Amino acid sequence: MRTGVRRAKTAAVSLRAQLLSWYDAHARELAWRIGPGARATGVRADPYRVWLSEVMLQQTTVPHATPYFLKFTQRWPTVNDLAAAADEDVMAAWAGLGYYARARNLLACARAVAGEHGGVFPDSEEGLRKLPGLGAYTAAAVAAIAFDRPSNVVDGNVERVMARLFAVEPPLPDAKAELKRLAGALVTDDRPGDWAQALMDLGATICRPKSPLCDRCPVLDHCAGFATGAPEAYPRKTAKAERPHRHGVAYVLTRGDEVALVRRPPKGLLGGMLALPTSDWRAERWSDAEALRAAPAEAAWRGVGEIEHGFTHFILTLRLLRAEGDAVGVIWSPRRDLDALPSVFLKAARAGLTNLL
Ligand code: SF4
């Protein structure tokens, strides 16, 4: 074996040992996790819970995802229970997690596992990948965490850790393949589930995006980024194009304690979800006259401010118009039930009902 290759292998072995031993002592306690102590005694994670948590974590942070995870697993303790749930119930329970296509994929996947695999998740990355709506990252994560397969589990956190550990100069997204290769070179058959989670924990708690806590890092002596003196400058990034801006009008129509809602068309953004009635969303702002013309009912509409909401691909400003009155073709909902609305409409309803401009 050439000396350089041998040195790299030795460094990888030492880096792995240091990170795993840190994980043994500092693993985060997560609602869906089987910690390293329990795993060492043979306890295995439930693939359903691992899969569900991974899908949720692609949307949001651990603190935000945890109550959703607990709510889902209490109501639907197994994949068969989730598969048998009504679409509207799952969509409503998902409200606030954003990106409803994922909730639809979640149901499609649960139904495939229940209907085609007898309620048992396939135990390999390839098998998992064939399930509907289950992407490459989730397949790798479930294979590693639930089935201890040596999968290369690479998300944005792991990319950041690799970019810093190896001081990778090409910027994202061009560097993705190289970062994946570097992460893959550290995966072995020894404790693959713990390894994937150790890297996740390192990225989440120590090698944080803005201020990495290098003085507490278990792999500091392997870190080329730290050696440069500016580890937070990795991963390098190409300048991001600004998200476009769209404008719309949301109508908060009340009838006593009830608020008028509509169901959005099944296809497209927030498809099939309950919503406040709105105008179209477009590049130009809406004039007063246009906003009144697009209203769902004739009423004494008055402006009560606006809200801004960031979607993945654009930023939306909604002007808010409020009135008391009646309308046909709407769904009247008690105010106390508005929490089930998608975030953008909940934000708009709350502001529309409380702003007195
Ligand atoms: Fe991240 Fe700092 Fe650790 Fe390097 S030393 S992996 S930059 S926390």
Image (spheres, helix red, strand yellow):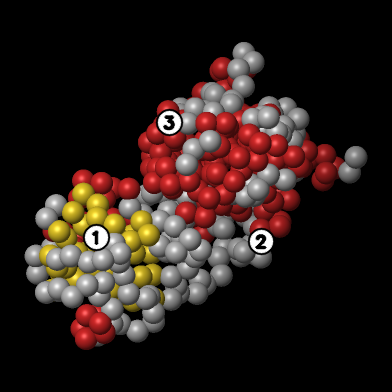
Instruction: Name the front one of labels 2 and 3.
Output: 3
Q: Nearer the viewer, residue 165 or 39?
A: 39
User: Quadrant of the rendered structure where residue 110 is?
Assistant: top right
User: Mark 1 vs mark 3: which is more N-terminal?
Assistant: 3
User: Mark 2 vs mark 1: which is more N-terminal?
Assistant: 2
Residue shown at 51% from the left, 59% from the top? 233
Residue at the disc numbered 3: 75
Q: Nearer the viewer, residue 6 or 117?
A: 117
Residue type, mark 2 in image: Ala
Residue shown at 28% from the left, 48% from the top? 339
Q: Quadrant of the C terminus?
A: bottom left
Residue shown at 72% from the left, 27% from the top? 190
Instruction: Name the front one of labels 1 and 3.
Output: 1
Q: Residues within 10 Å of mark 2 (few under 14, many from 20)?
A: some
Look at the image and tell me whether residue 67 can be seen.
yes
User: Mark 2 vs mark 3: which is more N-terminal?
Assistant: 3
Q: Residues within 10 Å of mark 3 (few under 14, many from 20)?
A: few
Residue at the disc numbered 1: 260
